[in-house]
Amino acid sequence: MNNLARHPQLLQFAVLLVVFFILCFSIGPSENNILWRLPALLAGVPEMLNSAVEYAMFDWMPIQTFNVEIEDYEESALLMEVTRSMSRAVLFGIELIREILVGGQKTIVAFSSWDFVSENEWAFWPALPWTVVAGIGITLGYALSGRWLAILVGCATTYIAVFGQWVPAMETLSFVLVAAPASVLLGVILAVVAFKSRAFEAALMPLLNVAQTMPHFSYLVPVTVFFGVGDHAGAIATVIFATPPMIRLTLLGLKGVSPEVLEAGMMNGCNKVQLMLKVLIPTARHDILVGVNQVIMQCLAMAVIASFIGAKGLGFNLLLALNQLRIGQALELGICIVLIAVVLDKLSLGWANKQIDYFADLSFVERHKYSLLMAAILVVGVVLASIGSLIFKDGINYFYLIPHNQGLTTENFWQSGVDWMVDNWYSSLQAFNTGLIVNVLVPMKNAYLGMPVSATFVLVMGVGYIVGGLRSALVVGGLLLFIALTEWWDRALITAYMATFGVLVSVAIGTISGSLCAQNPIATKAMLLICDTFQTFPSFIYLIPVIMLFGVTDTSVLIAVIIYATIPATRYTLEGLSNVPQSLQDAGTMSGVSRFQRWIQIELPLAFPHIMLGINQTVVFALFMVIIGAMIGTDDLGQLILKSLSDEHGIGNGLMLGLCVAFIGLAVDQILRTWASERKKALGVA
């Protein structure tokens, strides 16, 4: 009773659970009972969206355009011409960079014709030798972060080249080198406008919240309708997906500029444009470059997903390998993708953390020593490639470009390992798989599907009210109402069940491992390094080992979810416990408490707000991975989103399904963020 008196919220939660279970047991399944399921009043919205998009793409504002193939004018909708022009511009940029890296003719054709290219054998854009790209990368790594990053870049590029994956790797890189700058530019422009206009910021923030909780696949559906399929469509989807973090971090950096710096700029006579370009943006440089790092990581993650709509590169080859169950080749490709992700992550972080001495008095050679070294590497690399063409006259020029799948391979080694595991572990893995599905997953799934909609609303809105009051309850209730009024409520419950299972296990693992590592500084650094490394992996990669071990089942998806979602749970627990003041820990020890009591009664309560933010990220990660897991077979919202990709009229369903997933994430985000904020106020650290 004393605990209930000190913590009245516990009594409120207990009453809420009693009401929830009473409703669950008293309301039986009935399609005509609105307490069981609400009518699908929004079921016609997807068709309305399809009709609106079809009208905009094919009938709205027709204009006369000249068709080169028929050499005559024809009528076409304005929006179609605009989107097709954007597609051509983006595709030209991708092909230009791609042909600089791996050679080709399409850029030359863009300024001439295929007839010209076929009549002139010299009309071919030669590739940069892989040694040149590797050398420039090594130099860049050394310039930004020293010899260890240079060694990492050298090992990564050599591995990719030697194993015959250079061409698809450069195709992926060309994709990122077009999408990332576009995302950065768009993000900075929108952040500057939001910084200048409070009204624009207020309108933009909810859109960013939705965009950052929408699953990857949902971006692909509208893009395929407006821009078609191929590299350009994937790049445009990537720009849309990667821009929100750039906006947030740029806005955070601009708001963090001290008033004294602004006053100094104004006192020196800066106008508004000069103040932005020469004072605010340079001062916010670190936050902006951290945003660039996030954009690059998002672009690479999306580059793999974009293979579903025809984007070339390692992601496309990985998708083919998984479809053919060539696990050995998939692992090889996965390692290449991870290496590119780690290298780009470390290079961009090195750029963000690089200190610039604006007052150094250096000579021309000292200022541009790395640029001059890169130019020398280019010359030496070209000379080596020329010598290689003589040495390897009848074979592969290893100093120039190793053709795709013509290098070394470990596919047979990995495949034999997979076969050995199947032969020796199959019965044990199947027993675990069957036991988990029969005894845990199916009962949990049935329990979720057996929840009446009224009971679900009472539970979720009740938690929102206890944690954050009436406003929080109305927000989560409104988000839930949208899902309940669609025809996919049961699918949403299945998505929620899978995410819940993944989050519970991830939080348990993350909290325990983070708490254990926080006791030792060396273990803390090692765990943060592991989290940093795993966080650079594109989410698609986590499916490879679980398919290898468990096949195409819910178990595979959930284990991938747990591995992926444990990262933020561990990191935030570790950081929260590490930030507990040492003086409070010493005071607890001097009071005679044991280490376990100190952890339970002092460290965890003080770190609780930070841990809650980690759980919030864990939920988002879990939702993303559940949706991506649809490609290996689930019956949740992700499966329907994946199906809408192959439906020419799937844009309505795709957008509505994406919003359903986003609103699940936003509802949890509202509760957890409010709870963390209230705890901060209670602890006096707000």
Image (cartoon, rainbow, N blue to C red):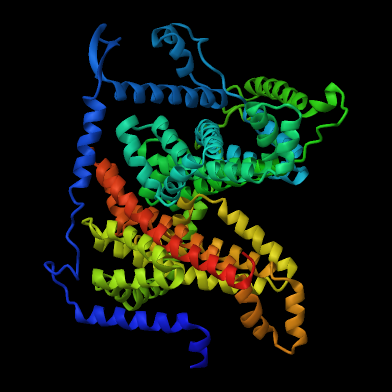
Quadrant where the C terminus sits is bottom right
Q: Position of residue 157 (x, y in %)?
A: 63, 39
Quadrant of the image occupied by residue 559: bottom left
Q: Position of residue 639 (x, y in %)?
A: 30, 54
Quadrant of the image occupied by residue 116: top left
Picture mark count = 0
Q: 480 or 444: nearer the eye?
A: 480
Q: Measured along the vertical axis of the image, is residue 172 above or below residue 218?
A: above
Q: Position of residue 627 (x, y in %)?
A: 37, 55
Q: Residue at x 73, y 37 (%)?
A: 263
Q: Does any portion of residue 159 appear in the rendered image?
A: no
Q: Residue at x 56, y 48 (%)?
A: 338
In the image: residue 20, left or right of residue 362 = left
Q: Position of residue 334 (x, y in %)?
A: 51, 48
Q: Measured along the vertical axis of the image, is residue 591 above or below residue 685?
A: below
Q: 349 or 667: nearer the eye?
A: 667
